[in-house]
Image (cartoon, helix red, strand yellow):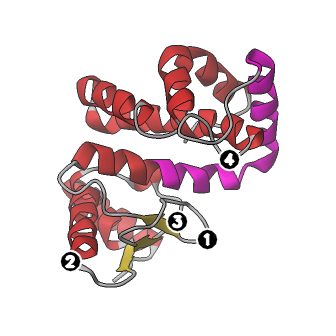
Amino acid sequence: MRLAPALMGVVLAAYPGASTFLSAQTISIRTAHDFPGEQQAKAQLERLLNQYEMTRYTFTHDILIEERAIPRSHPVLTLNTRHLGEDDEALSAYLHEQIHWFLSGRERQREAGEAELEGLSAGPPVGGEDGARDLESDYLHRIVCELEREADLQLLGAERAAAVMPFRAGDHYRWIYGTVIVDHDKIQAVIKSHSLEIP
């Protein structure tokens, strides 16, 4: 059941602790094949959505769990099953794809931010385990990954967020995440100058 915004406001005012429960109820999570691992990942994500206040980081409500999929944001936010038993990494992967949706509605600001990042460093790697599929995606992912780092910090706290980023930097987009860890202040400045902060 989805509540109208006005009614949800009344419920949240009366029951402040209900916000996490309601945020999870507005998300539709499907499995691609109904495999056991997909069902476990669905249950894990539902639990995380109930545990954390995710309204600020929710930009699409349609989620698909597909066991061997490469995680992606569009056209449907799709996650795989690789982070079963790793809640912090699973949450961060989910946030990453939601942030792509946030940025997809801010094309002009995003492109200006990418152009500024291009001027800050030349020759990032493309492809493989270090970079994204092309240069434009490399610069885009520096913004995405920095916003992901900031969201991790807000939701998980400093100690746990600090553990997630090195894991991500050793797993994929290694150069991009490594740059975010080292230069997050510079990237944050670009994000703020182009109004790309998550409200």
Q: Which residue is mark 4?
A: 133
Q: Earlier in the sequence, mark 4 or mark 3?
A: 3
SS under mark 3: loop
Image vertical order of residue 184 relative to residue 171, above or below: above
- Residue on which the image places disc 3: 60
49 or 132, nearer to the observer: 132
Q: Nearer the viewer, mark 2 or mark 1?
A: 2
Q: Which residue is mark 1?
A: 75
Callout 2: helix, strand or loop?
A: helix
Q: Is residue 22 left or right of residue 70?
A: left
Residue type at numbered disc 1: Pro
Q: Position of residue 51 (x, y in %)?
A: 21, 53
Q: CA distance from mark 4 to mark 1?
A: 18 Å
Q: Which residues are magenta?
A: 96-122
Q: CA distance from mark 3 to mark 1?
A: 10 Å
The residue that appears at 32% across and 33% down in the rendered structure is 164
Please name the residue shown 29% across and 57% down the image: 13
Q: CA distance from mark 4 to mark 3?
A: 24 Å
Q: Residue 116 magenta-drawn?
A: yes
Give the Cα separation between the discs numbered 4 and 2.
31 Å
